[in-house]
Amino acid sequence: MKRLLEAELIYGRLLEISEQHLIARYNKALEGFGLHPTALSSFRIDMTGFSPEIADELGDRDYLDPNRVNRRFILLTPAQEELPVVHTSFSNTAALMHEFFFANARAINAVTIRDALYGEIEDTVSTVDDIDDLLSINEVRFRVLSAEDMLGKAAELRTLTDRLKTEPSAWADDGLLNRMVELAKVTGDIRENALVPDQLVFRHDAFWANHFGGVYVFLDEKTTTVICDPSVPGFRRSRPWQVSYISLSDHQRIYEFLASTKRLQLPQASWVQDSGLYQHRADMILRGLVNQADPTADLGSIDQIWLQTWMHRNSALVASDGAYPFLQGMIRSVLSSGTIRMQEVPPENRFLLVRAAPEHPDQWLTNRLISQLVPSDFVSRFVFDKEGFYGAYEHYSEKFREYVVATLTGTYLRNKVAFRKRLYGLREETSNA
């Protein structure tokens, strides 16, 4: 992973924490969770406050994710909203955090001037033993505390203020008045500064969970669809009267589900030509075959002439794999006719030709599923399914790793928003990728 770290392809865009008062607040939050405080003089954090350095120090990557449910968070600054989430068990953790930041911006801005917020994103289950546990999570509640107890002091000051307004004799209580002055020195004027978050409950929408090797849960008006390996506990047994189950290897049914629910953008010359997605995937496939034939090949130095010569010499390998000539044929077809008759395409090849419908709210989750079903496209896998990408990267040859890192840094990292807009039609920054 050293090459990924150096290229900021893992744990990139994190916020460095080195100010002693922020470290002290972070430590109080750790102690609030029953964890040992850090001895580090600096570390980096993501949107939720997760730090890879502290995870290493504690020897526990899940120190903010116990049981991989009821995710913990530590907020030191409002600037964390702009950071990615680099370690989570649910794909919608970043979306929930964004909602929390947006709904409670005034309180977060006010409290983090002098304190840190920490707590848990509480689900309705404490452990996940089968699919039914995942399906039970309909909403989450943010349980929020503060390292210096500013929230508690603000609540106490509010109570004392109410007493002062309602109890005529309260003005003669020197102890009450002195306590209010003492609290106000910490909290400021709570009439002007909203220190208590306003909204703490949020809906838990469609998501991917990393439990049991990965489970996709899609929500529609009257049905819930689960896509995962059939060996997952509860598959076809948890709520069969209201849940549709699809095997992750059943390309036909997955395609039919995504297409029928308008989650896919089907082939049309307009977006296929502008995006360059088909040629991108064809190039990924071809270079993957080169590496398969010779893991020591320097893919970074080859050009199109070299590739054409290689294809002639290895035509049997290219033909037996079939994906590259298939995509070339589809490029010609869509350019000549404007579309592709998807019912004539073998189910295992259909996901090479589609992308998530850019306007659908599940666009990121759908693209994640597509990228898992098209593993040869490591760029899409990195954009939408980083956990899957890192797992695949471990099995790449050293030369291929070198090529992968060079490709990602030379394309995607140069301008993420523009890259996602061109290849996938995504029009705005809607995830933490």
Image (tube, helix red, strand yellow):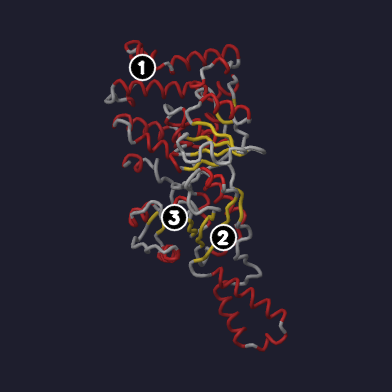
Residue 168's image quarter?
bottom right
For disc 3, the marked residue is: 64
Comparing 349 with 315, the one in front is 349
Residue drawn at (62%, 84%) of the image? 177
Asked if residue 41 lies left or right of residue 165, the reply is: left
Of label 3 and label 1, which has the lower sequence position? 3
Residue 208 at x, y = what percent?
A: 51, 41
Evaluate whether residue 361 shows in this view.
Answer: no
Comparing 49 with 188, the one in front is 49
The kind of residue tagged 2 is Ile
Q: CA distance from mark 3 to mark 2?
A: 20 Å
User: Which of the numbered marks, if any, corresponds to residue 108?
Assistant: 2
Of label 2 and label 1, which has the lower sequence position? 2
Of label 3 and label 2, which has the lower sequence position? 3
Q: CA distance from mark 3 to mark 1?
A: 47 Å
Nearest-to-viewer mark from 3 and 1: 3
The kind of residue tagged 3 is Leu
Evaluate whether residue 409 shows in this view.
Answer: yes
For disc 1, the marked residue is: 307
Residue 122 at x, y = what percent?
A: 54, 55
Q: Is 237 situated above or below 376?
A: below
The kind of residue tagged 1 is Leu
Q: Are marks 2 and 1 in contact (CB under 8 Å)?
A: no
Crowding near pointer 1: few (<14 within 10 Å), some, many (20+)?
some
Secondary structure of residue under mark 3: loop
Residue 376 at x, y = what percent?
A: 42, 26
